[in-house]
Amino acid sequence: MSLVKFRKRPFESLLIPDLLDFNANQLFNDHLWLKKMDEPALNIKEKKDGFEIELAAPGYDKKDFEITIDNGCLNISAKKTISKDEKDENYTRKEFSYSSFERSLELPESIIDEKIKAKYENGILKFNLAKKEEAKKAKPKVIEIS
């Protein structure tokens, strides 16, 4: 018979098996990790004539977004506040919620800022970024291994 160290850490069993020595408390206390959990998922596809970006942001309306281009960065932010009041002769109920996010993407120099288009549909914010003509014609450089 042998002694086994007892370890009980909150959330650990939800994340990974007990076989690994993992500190779940550190993960949930890490500010950078928590910030990443709040950012919406992003897909970027490069095509011959430009890029397509899809950002998953369900639950927002078109008016909730603010999109700017500043110093070569595409800045996307959204804020939404919902408030509901219910009054009766015996009680008053007030509920509210607030959600927001910010994402910034550094744009390559091959993008035409004036031709960036955005569309919000079914919880997905889609961007089309057109490439400059010289970027469309450029061929990838092949690097030889020595």
Image (cartoon, rainbow, N blue to C red):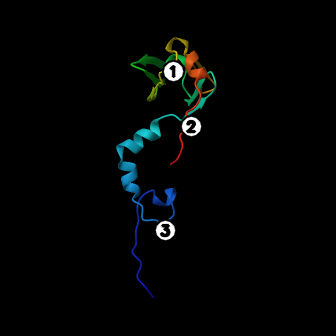
- Judged by depth in the image, the label closer to the viewer, 1 or 2, is 2
- Judged by depth in the image, the label closer to the viewer, 2 or 3, is 2
Residue type pointed to by label 2: Val
Question: Mark 3 sits on what residue?
Answer: 19
Disc 2 and disc 3: Cα gap in Å?
A: 44 Å
From the viewer's side, name the closer residue of 146 and 91. 146
- The answer to whether residue 92 shows anywhere in this view is no
- Judged by depth in the image, the label closer to the viewer, 1 or 3, is 1
Element type at mark 3: loop
Question: Mark 2 sits on what residue?
Answer: 142
Residue type pointed to by label 3: Leu
Question: Mark 1 sits on what residue?
Answer: 110
Residue type pointed to by label 1: Ser
Q: Position of residue 77 (x, y in %)?
A: 45, 24
Looking at the rendered image, the quarter that the N terminus falls into is: bottom left
Element type at mark 1: loop
Question: In terms of sequence position, does the residue under pointer 2 or pointer 3 come before the other?
Answer: 3
Determine which quarter of the picture holds residue 128. top right
Element type at mark 2: loop
Disc 1 and disc 3: Cα gap in Å?
A: 48 Å
From the viewer's side, name the closer residue of 70 and 64. 70
Going by the picture, which residue comes out furthest to the bottom?
Answer: 1
